[in-house]
Amino acid sequence: MSRKVPFLPGSRAYRPEEFPKPKPQLFRYRDGLPIPVDQDSRYMAAEQAAAALAAASLGDSSSTAFMGAQPLPASPSTPAAAAASARSTSGAACQSSTPQWVTYDKKVLRFYAFFKEGVDDSPEENFRVRRCHILIYLEDGSLSVVEPKEDNSGLFQGTFLKRHKVVHPSGVGSIGPRDMAIDADITLYARTFHIIGCDAFTRTFMQAELSRTMALDQPFPSDPHSQLIAAQHAREASRMHRPISAAQVAKAQSAHKFFSLDRKVLEFMAYWDDTDSLFGDVRLYKLQYYLSDDTMEVVEVLPRNCGRDPFPKFLRRMRLPRDTPMTGARPPTNEERERQSKSAYNWQDFRLGSRIQVFDRILILYDCDEFTQQWYRAQAGMTDVDFVPLQVPQLDQPYQPTMTIPPNVLGIGSEEDTLQNVYQLTPKPPRSDFNHFVQNDGKALRFGGKLLRQADGSPVETADLERKFVISYHLAEDMISIFEPPFKTLGFEGGKFLERCKLAKPGTKERYRPQDLYLGARLVASGRIFELQEVDMYTLKYMEAYRRLYPLADSNTVVAKLRANLAGPSQESTFRTALISPATPTTAVTGQQLQGILARQNIQLASQEIVTLARLLNPLASSLSDTLDVLNLLSALGLS
């Protein structure tokens, strides 16, 4: 393609010479190691030759491959000899493919040596042999001295000489493997070490690389401190081979018993019958036996309000002897103590009904816990018959008068508030259900009622029969209030008939609950009997919303009840005829008429249930005067 073609999209030609070439590599890899590559090998060889000549002129021994100080070759006398030497050196440098620090990486020569150090402040020794390891690192020719740590040596041991190149005592080069030999001395910073051996790798390396055969290893010399330690080890070894005594066997058995039975405790219930003494009674105790060491402790079980001092333990944990030891001024001898320990109680002595003597006090075991039963079943082969609890003797309980709460005759404050003076010496305000108060705050169920008669059964006055009252049940406080609307024609002012308070049912202390108020219910307040004859729409909706609490407002429950009472073809026919007959040509009846029809068939439904049926057919119905469609009623009852 011609170069005159413009560089339009899609018309440019591919020319390899225009693309960039790869950058030259600065390293090449040999044996997995990066080695720098110089473009001018002749310059590299000349530089290495110059370095070799400079080292030869300065007397540096680094070209000896860290093998130690050696005689250096004589420097060339003429420039031609120097150039020839440089060419040979550069050729040798180019021929070496792997650096020496890679060849000898992680290869260390180990020589064993010691030096003697005087001890001035000890009567037991006057010198100490310090055992050391001399390490030579072949990768860089460095050297370090390490002293292995010994227990209870009293010396600061570890790194004795840090790793670095140590100058040869002659002042030329550094100390290397050629300077090391067994049964020879080497001086490091005015400290003379005597080499006595080396490890296997060092011996092989010296033979293969330096053609030197190392002498046999020598032992470390002895010193007073090592002799003392060896004597102690010998005494301990002889003590280990002694025959085991009976005391040691008993101690080992005791230790085994402790570790195998640790935290395993047998627990028995016991009582002490002290009724024979003056003012004595039956005392209860808890006996705990520790299987790990055959000790036991006794704790008294105090009933509530017994008036006794709560001592923490009746018997501290100990081995309980079977016989009460003699007390007096003379302390018991060792034989007496051993005899008492051998005659102590064991777990095999305990059974339900056993009499345990606790220092002249007889305790009778009458029950045990579940773990104790399992232990005796496994160890003693007992059965359930052996664990039947025994009867604890009971004393005649003293007469305790029953607490009688006097009635609140004064009528001051609520009854709960008044009772706090009976329950507590310092009265506190009674607790109220805050959640119930928040959920029902401002909610009240209102009913319309009339007076029927006095609470004692006497009839009311004729004028009282015309009076009407509004009875409110306040759900937040569970209180009832009665209000009388004013009617000028009746001659009564009206107003509050009963202040908001909690009313109790006649003859009982049970309070009126919201479920007790419904159409047709009767309420006794202030010596008067009220009959609830009206209800507002909010109360009806509230009762239907919580029909689980108000079954009389549940339409399903009322329909099921009426359907059950009309079971049978004859009763259904009678009920259908009473609703649809020539005497009642209309197709609607009021709630009062429906209640009368059911009453003639001996079916008693409360006024609230009649209103519930009416609201099933007409959601706006709220009283007995509301009409019910006959056909819809029969359809709802399944009688159409």
Image: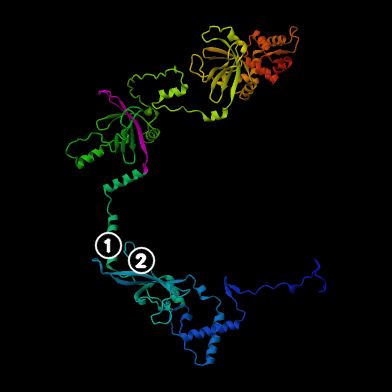
Q: Is 502 contained in the magenta span?
A: no
Against 394, is 75 above or below?
Answer: below
- Could you say whether the residue bearing mark 1 is in a helix, strand or loop? helix
Instruction: Please say whether residue 31 is visible from this viewpoint.
Output: no
> In the image, which residues are magenta?
260-284
Q: Position of residue 533 (x, y in %)?
A: 62, 14
Counting residues from the start of the chain, the first of labels 1 and 2 encountered is 2
**Outermost residue to the bottom:** 78
Against 109, is 623 above or below?
Answer: above
The residue wearing badge 1 is: 231
Q: Is 262 contained in the magenta span?
A: yes
- Could you say whether the residue bearing mark 2 is in a helix, strand or loop? loop
The three-letter code of the residue at mark 2 reads: Gln
- Labelled disc at residue 157: 2
**Outermost residue to the left:** 329
Q: Is residue 39 left or right of residue 3?
A: left
Against 389, is 81 above or below?
Answer: below
The three-letter code of the residue at mark 1 reads: Ala
